[in-house]
Image (cartoon, grey):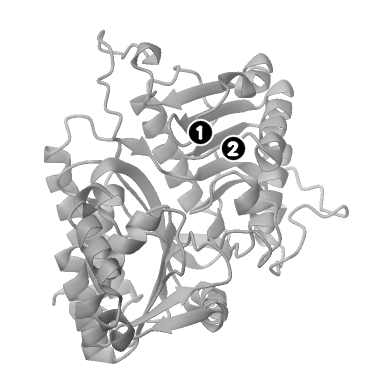
């Protein structure tokens, strides 16, 4: 039986989906002479996860995890701003390195452009910092096969990931969103477990220090305990090697079972076959009841537009949340040009008005949730290294849906009549930028 005929989230569906994904992974490896995937993606059981709706909470978790790590801390980030939030994270990393923790930081050259001396405290404390694909070709590192890395300025590391060891009691204690990740009366359990934090947030004040509704960009994050954190640690190791990071002995992470969630960690890289895009489209094709999408940069391909239209026609419940005003206006224009067919098919398009929308969240049939760094645009699928997690479980999806409903209440629904009534100058502008959408 094809996997699309099975109910999303069941054990049979996971096995069938994984089999198809492995077949795609074998094809993808044929197109990459230097793949960053060490093994085919897999669902792993026994995980615990918390949705981080507030960037301030996301920052608290990051700082607490770095401060309590005793073995290793790996951080991979696209934008590492040199502001208050960035300074807090940098100083926590430097303190961890100073107390003997193995610290590795991988940041993107374009996303984190700035004074390179900003990272000196980490290096001086004994940590390792690597700039991914430097914009300045004279800063390229020598590769392990004896020649200089190719200079490919369009290929960017857009992933956001923190992996470290943490007290095992963190994974086993009850947690309510808003709780302090490391309370003063915390248990003194010396047993360790693996922790991973990922999502769409970069490190910067607009993501992590301003209050919700008062300057904080609307974004997403997830903190995970359990075996999936080890899979994510392996993905960081592969990317570190790919970026020519120095070879060092890295302590292994322990991953005792921490919950009952099945999670699949999924990375992608530039190339002809993109596993993340295939997975998102495949999930969309299997929706039976409803689909919810929050996307900061929505420039869908023909295949994506067809899949969303089919969901709307089949279920009558397909909600798409996009920014009212994006931080990249030309993406808004190119996206708007493509909305006509979706609106005609019944896709409900909402424009988020409270703040800048930077979220990348997908909820399928109130059961399967995808959170990560990837948008629905050509840049994410053709030029970026991306990372997302597929979380199976209604208990995790419920709070994500609650926040999605709140977001819709702060949004304006965009209608087909409004799309048709756009002024001529806007129609021409939208059309023009849509011609360049393969580069957006």
Q: Secondary structure at mark 2?
A: loop
Q: Which mark is residue 112?
A: 1
359 left or right of 243?
A: right
Nearer-the-camera pick, 258 or 437? 437
Left or right: 57 in relation to 259: right
Observer-nearest residue: 392 or 92?
Answer: 92
Is residue 57 toward the left or the right of residue 131 in the image? right
What's the residue at 26%, 86% (across, down)? 312
Mark 2 crowd level (few <14, some 14–19, many ≥20, 10 Å Cα) = some
Q: Are marks 2 and 1 in contact (CB under 8 Å)?
A: yes
Query: Which residue is depicted at the point 46% across and 64% down?
Result: 325
Q: Which residue shows up at 54% across the image and 38% down it?
A: 253
| Label located before the other in sequence (2 or 1) | 2
Q: Nearer the viewer, residue 352 or 301?
A: 352
Q: Quadrant of residue 33?
A: top left
Query: In x, y percent, where is residue 90?
Result: 66, 32
Q: Name the residue that disc number 2 marks.
A: 81
């Amino acid at each position: 039986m094809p996997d699309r005929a099975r109910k999303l989230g069941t054990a049979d569906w996971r096995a069938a989906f994984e089999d198809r994904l492995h077949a795609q992974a074998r094809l993808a490896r044929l197109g990459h002479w230097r793949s960053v995937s060490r093994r085919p993606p897999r669902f792993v059981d026994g995980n615990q996860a918390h949705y981080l709706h507030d960037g301030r909470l996301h920052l608290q978790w990051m700082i607490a995890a770095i401060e309590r790590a005793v073995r290793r801390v790996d951080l991979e980030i696209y934008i590492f701003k040199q502001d208050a939030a960035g300074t807090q994270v940098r100083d926590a990393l430097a303190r961890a390195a100073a107390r003997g923790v193995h610290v590795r930081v991988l940041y993107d050259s374009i996303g984190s452009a700035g004074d390179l001396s900003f990272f000196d405290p980490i290096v001086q404390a004994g940590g390792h910092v690597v700039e991914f694909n430097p914009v300045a070709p004279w800063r390229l590192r020598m590769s392990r096969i004896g020649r200089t890395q190719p200079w490919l300025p369009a290929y960017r590391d857009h992933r956001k990931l923190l992996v470290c060891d943490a007290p095992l009691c963190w994974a086993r204690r009850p947690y309510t969103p808003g709780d302090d990740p490391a309370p003063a009366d915390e248990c003194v359990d010396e047993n360790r477990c693996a922790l991973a934090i990922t999502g769409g947030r970069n490190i910067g004040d607009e993501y992590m220090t301003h209050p919700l509704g008062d300057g904080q960009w609307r974004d997403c994050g997830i903190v995970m305990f359990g075996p999936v954190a080890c899979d994510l640690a392996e993905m960081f190791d592969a990317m570190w090697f790919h970026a020519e990071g120095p070879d060092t002995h890295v302590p292994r992470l322990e991953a005792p079972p921490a919950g009952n969630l099945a999670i699949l960690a999924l990375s992608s890289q530039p190339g002809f076959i993109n596993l993340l895009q295939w997975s998102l489209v495949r999930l969309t094709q299997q929706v039976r009841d409803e689909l919810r999408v929050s996307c900061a940069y929505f420039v869908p391909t023909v295949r994506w537009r067809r899949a969303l239209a089919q969901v709307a026609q089949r279920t009558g419940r397909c909600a798409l949340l996009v920014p009212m005003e994006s931080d990249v206006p030309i993406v808004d224009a190119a996206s708007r040009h493509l909305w006509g067919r979706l609106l005609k098919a019944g896709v409900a398009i909402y424009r988020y008005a409270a703040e800048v929308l930077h979220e990348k969240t997908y909820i399928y049939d109130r059961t399967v949730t995808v959170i990560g760094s990837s948008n629905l645009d050509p840049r994410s699928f053709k030029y970026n290294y991306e990372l997302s997690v597929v979380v199976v479980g209604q208990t995790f999806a419920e709070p994500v849906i609650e926040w999605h409903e709140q977001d819709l209440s702060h949004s304006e629904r965009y209608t087909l009549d409004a799309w048709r009534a756009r002024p001529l100058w806007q129609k021409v502008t939208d059309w023009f930028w849509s011609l360049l959408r393969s580069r957006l």
